[in-house]
């Protein structure tokens, strides 16, 4: 490997791959430039074979017209979304049951969101659509029945209008200044609060209710019981329960089953809205002004909401203005959120389990049931069960099943609306073959450097020449943290395990092909301690520092 810095010179011994071992291309030359423009110019001139930094928009539009350059799209491990406050009320409107606490209102918001417009027009194509809050680079974890083209809430303003009408959010008598006769389903009048809305009680078994039979007096006047669910003794999931409702005493009774102690009797029912028939209060919508795409996506939804007869209080603010009311006070209806996601979708547990609903907690969309004490998710109790199963699974397979179960519930009740993750493009010369364009990371990975090779008529066919847009600061495995430092170090040091480059949610063996966990007794203190045994691949070759000579002995 030879390292050349355009700003700094690193003196290293040039080492070639051993014949029959290691990479297909014997030599690797790494060049570091001062700017992305310098690096791209070198790629265009044929001075390097691969640029290990995403292209700018201008470079992308130039590269797509060049037949000598190959482009590799890379979606980031992240998510931008419309976060929706599912809580029954918000501080700005005390005592008013929030429209966004109603499942059909949230579904209507999803139907008013044109995701392809956001991806293609607002993001200019530098985005990958998302329908579930699962990193797109872990496809084995996705519930494919919940994503495009199977997504239930594809953009359809007419369907949104019909859903709002059916849920009681009908047009009133106040003229809508944003009425647009050319917009499907646009409302001539401002919509009003419905006559009745969905609310929840969740008395705790053994504390608030005992039985069987289990009798509970509802804490708000009920006009209709929607669902009664409970955790039957010995079962894992909450199930729908048979019940009787006494309208005279405003109570329900469940008999014939024994419920797990300390679980909850989850009751979903309708109650009169305190402002029934009055114009909707403005929906408080926070949009990040310091991120243009999020701001424009928020403006898109707010515009469609207004045309639909839903008043909006649109507050475009930087992060410092959005965080306190959204994540701290929960005093909002909609927020243009964004998250970095890990390669495993365990983030679902923290972002949506009701136990994390707290000031400044990760979850600021899905609250617990409010009455008489905080309980399982107000969306559906089984959402909490599935999310917990992800985190506490005993195997990868169990975690994937739980994640897909959670996504099915999530899609049905729309606690928030995933939109997109950012997408960038890497570039290399067409004479380079065998490149691994790894999900989430691009071509800069061990698979590429082992497998890539050049066509016979390419310049310097036995040398792979790669370029970075900035020089490193150091090359010290103990102290380096800069991405350009690790551009060097990752070519020298290797890990024991790896991940599938085309599905980051899948581990795979690498230097370590298998392992086992057991115990041993330490003779020094007589204590039983953990023992981990690793089986190393037999086709891995260890090399000495500096010279790169094969070394068959190593120490741990």
Image (spheres, rainbow, N blue to C red):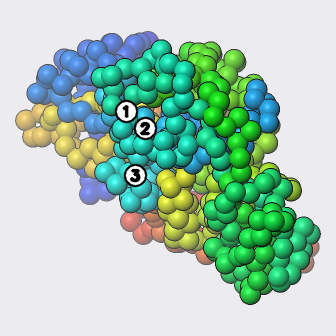
Asked if the residues shown at circle 3 and circle 2 are in contact, with their CB atoms under 8 angstroms apart, the answer is no
Estimate how packed mark 3 is, as few (under 14), some (14 to 19) or many (20 or more) residues with alpha carbons within 10 Å: some
Establish if 280 lies above or below 135.
Answer: above
Q: Is residue 338 visible in the rendered structure shown here? A: no
Q: In which quarter of the image is residue 266?
A: bottom right
Q: Nearer the viewer, residue 220 or 61?
A: 220
For the residue labelled by badge 3, is the local secondary structure a helix, a strand or a loop?
Answer: loop
- Distance from Cα at disc 3 to Cα at disc 2: 16 Å
Establish if 517 lies above or below 539.
Answer: below
- Distance from Cα at disc 1 to Cα at disc 2: 5 Å
- Distance from Cα at disc 3 to Cα at disc 1: 19 Å
What residue is pinned by disc 2? Answer: 161
Can you name the residue that lies furthest to the left here?
A: 457
The C terminus appears in which quarter of the rendering? bottom right
What residue is pinned by disc 1? Answer: 185
| Residue found at x 19% / y 43% | 433
Residue 460 picture location, percent across and down: 17, 32
For the residue labelled by badge 1, is the local secondary structure a helix, a strand or a loop?
Answer: loop
Establish if 143 lies above or below 198.
Answer: below
Q: Using the image, tell me which numbered label, if any, was put on residue 152.
A: 3
Residue 429 picture location, percent across and down: 19, 31
Q: Using the image, tell me which numbered label, if any, was put on residue 434.
A: none
Establish if 537 lies above or below 549.
Answer: below
Q: Quadrant of residue 86?
A: top right
First in sequence: mark 3 or mark 1? 3
Labels 3, 2: front one: 2
Q: Is residue 192 visible in the rendered structure shown here? A: yes
Asked if the residues shown at circle 1 and circle 2 are in contact, with their CB atoms under 8 angstroms apart, the answer is yes
For the residue labelled by badge 2, is the local secondary structure a helix, a strand or a loop?
Answer: helix
**Numbered circles on residues, count:** 3
């Amino acid at each position: 490997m030879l390292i050349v810095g355009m700003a700094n010179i690193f003196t290293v011994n040039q080492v070639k791959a051993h014949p029959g071992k290691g990479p297909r291309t014997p030599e690797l030359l790494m060049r570091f430039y001062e700017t992305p423009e310098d690096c791209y110019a070198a790629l265009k001139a044929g001075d390097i074979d691969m640029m290990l930094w995403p292209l700018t928009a201008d470079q992308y539009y130039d590269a797509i017209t060049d037949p000598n350059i190959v482009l590799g799209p890379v979606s980031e491990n992240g998510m931008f979304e419309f976060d929706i406050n599912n809580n029954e009320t918000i501080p700005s409107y005390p005592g008013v049951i929030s429209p966004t606490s109603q499942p059909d209102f949230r579904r209507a918001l999803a139907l008013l969101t044109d995701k392809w417009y956001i991806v293609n027009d607002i993001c200019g194509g530098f985005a990958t659509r998302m329908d579930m809050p699962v990193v797109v680079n872990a496809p084995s974890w996705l519930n494919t029945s919940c994503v495009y083209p199977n997504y239930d809430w594809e953009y359809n303003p007419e369907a949104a209008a019909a859903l709002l009408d059916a849920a009681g959010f009908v047009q009133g008598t106040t003229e809508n200044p944003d009425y647009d006769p050319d917009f499907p389903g646009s409302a001539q009048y401002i919509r009003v609060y419905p006559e009745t809305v969905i609310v929840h009680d969740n008395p705790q078994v053994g504390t608030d209710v005992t039985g069987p039979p289990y009798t509970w007096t509802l804490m708000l006047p009920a006009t209709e019981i929607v669902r009664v669910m409970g955790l039957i003794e010995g079962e894992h999931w909450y199930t729908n329960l048979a019940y009787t409702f006494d309208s005279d005493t405003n109570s329900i009774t469940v008999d014939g089953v024994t419920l797990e102690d300390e679980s909850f009797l989850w009751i979903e029912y309708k109650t009169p809205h305190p402002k029934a028939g009055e114009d909707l209060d403005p929906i408080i919508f926070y949009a990040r002004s310091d991120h243009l795409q999020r701001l424009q996506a928020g403006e898109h939804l707010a515009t469609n909401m207004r045309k639909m007869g839903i008043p909006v209080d649109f507050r475009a603010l930087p992060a410092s203005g959005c965080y306190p009311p959204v994540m701290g006070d929960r005093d909002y209806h909609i927020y243009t959120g964004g998250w970095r996601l890990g390669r495993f979708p365990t983030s679902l547990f923290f972002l949506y389990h009701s136990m994390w609903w707290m000031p400044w907690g990760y979850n600021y969309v899905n609250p617990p049931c409010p009455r008489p004490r905080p309980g399982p998710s107000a969306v559906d109790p089984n959402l909490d069960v599935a999310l917990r199963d992800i985190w506490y699974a005993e195997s990868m397979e169990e975690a994937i099943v739980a994640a897909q179960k959670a996504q099915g519930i999530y899609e049905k009740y729309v606690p928030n609306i995933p939109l997109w993750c950012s997408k960038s493009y890497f570039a290399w010369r067409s004479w380079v073959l065998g490149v691994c364009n790894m999900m989430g990371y691009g071509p800069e990975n061990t698979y590429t450097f082992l497998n890539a090779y050049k066509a016979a008529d390419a310049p310097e066919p036995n040398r792979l020449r790669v370029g970075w847009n900035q020089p490193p600061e150091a090359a010290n495995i103990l102290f380096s943290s800069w991405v350009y430092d690790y551009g060097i170090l990752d070519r020298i040091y290797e890990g024991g395990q790896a991940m599938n480059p085309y599905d980051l949610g899948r581990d795979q063996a690498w230097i370590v092909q298998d392992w086992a966990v057991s115990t041993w007794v330490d003779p020094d203190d007589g204590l039983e301690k953990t023992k981990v045994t690793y089986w190393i691949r037999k086709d891995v070759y260890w090399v000495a520092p500096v010279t790169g000579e094969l070394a068959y002995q190593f120490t741990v």
